[in-house]
């Protein structure tokens, strides 16, 4: 399928867009199921797909999805870094490597959780009922606390 023929706009004054989240987990890895979901999403008029896979051969799963639909595909690169290396063993180069690899594979866009350490410290002191509720934000925050660092800030991405 030719992904280059698909362009969409997102923002004020534009029509509502439908995004379909799909992906494997460490407990359920069936790439054919993810391809089936992608085909159904396209058939019923979805505008984009977000692959949230964290189990199996994630690059192959992504290639299979892109080979079976022409919808723009978004990913969360830190998911693949965490799945492949483990939260305690990955470093920022693993995350940057995943961003580059996924871009080279033809991913249309990324979800990057750009969190400042200052913001994380404020959240830790707050009286929130729940902590960070985004899985990617939670992984990023945990990585920052384990490594006492900031990650994927604009300072780091400048070198990308």
Image (spheres, helix red, strand yellow):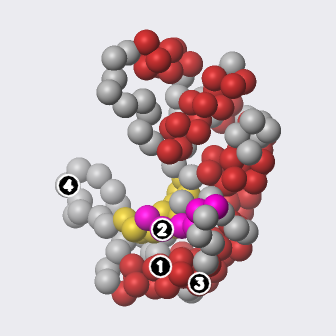
Mark toward the start of the polypeptide (3 vs 2): 2
Mark toward the start of the polypeptide (3 vs 1): 3
Q: Secondary structure at mark 3?
A: helix
Q: Is residue 3 left or right of residue 58?
A: left
User: Is disc 1 in contact with disc 4, using a CB cutoff of under 8 Å?
Assistant: no
Q: Residue at x 70, y 68 (%)?
A: 56
Q: CA distance from mark 3 to mark 2?
A: 12 Å
Residue 32 — which label?
A: 3
Mark toward the start of the polypeptide (1 vs 4): 4
User: Where in the figure is residue 137, as x and y percent of width and height?
Assistant: 51, 38
Per the picture, the main secondary structure of the magenta-coloured stretch is: loop
Instruction: Please report the bounds of the magenta region as a residue range.
Output: 21-26
User: Is disc 2 in contact with disc 1, using a CB cutoff of under 8 Å?
Assistant: yes
Q: Which residue is mark 1?
A: 38
Q: Residue at x 44, y 33 (%)?
A: 132
Mark toward the start of the polypeptide (4 vs 3): 4
Which of pointers 2 and 4 indicates the residue nearer the eye?
2
In the picture, the quarter occupied by the N terminus is: bottom right
Q: Residues within 10 Å of mark 2 (few under 14, many from 20)?
A: some
User: Is disc 3 in contact with disc 1, using a CB cutoff of under 8 Å?
Assistant: no
Q: Which residue is mark 2?
A: 22
Q: CA distance from mark 2 to mark 1?
A: 8 Å
């Amino acid at each position: 399928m030719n992904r280059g023929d698909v362009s969409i706009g997102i923002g004020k004054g534009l029509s509502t867009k439908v995004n379909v989240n799909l992906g494997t987990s460490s407990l359920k890895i069936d790439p054919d199921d993810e391809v089936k979901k992608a085909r159904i999403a396209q058939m019923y008029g979805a505008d984009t797909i977000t692959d949230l896979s964290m189990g199996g051969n994630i690059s192959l799963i992504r290639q299979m999805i892109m080979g079976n639909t022409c919808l723009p595909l978004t990913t969360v690169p830190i998911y693949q870094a965490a799945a492949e290396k483990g939260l305690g063993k990955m470093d920022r180069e693993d995350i940057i490597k995943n961003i580059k690899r996924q871009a080279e594979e033809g991913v249309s866009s990324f979800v990057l959780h750009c969190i400042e350490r200052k913001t994380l410290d404020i959240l830790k002191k707050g009286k929130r009922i729940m902590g960070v509720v985004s899985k990617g934000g939670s992984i990023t925050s945990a990585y920052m606390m384990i490594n006492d660092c900031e990650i994927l800030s604009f300072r780091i991405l400048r070198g990308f």
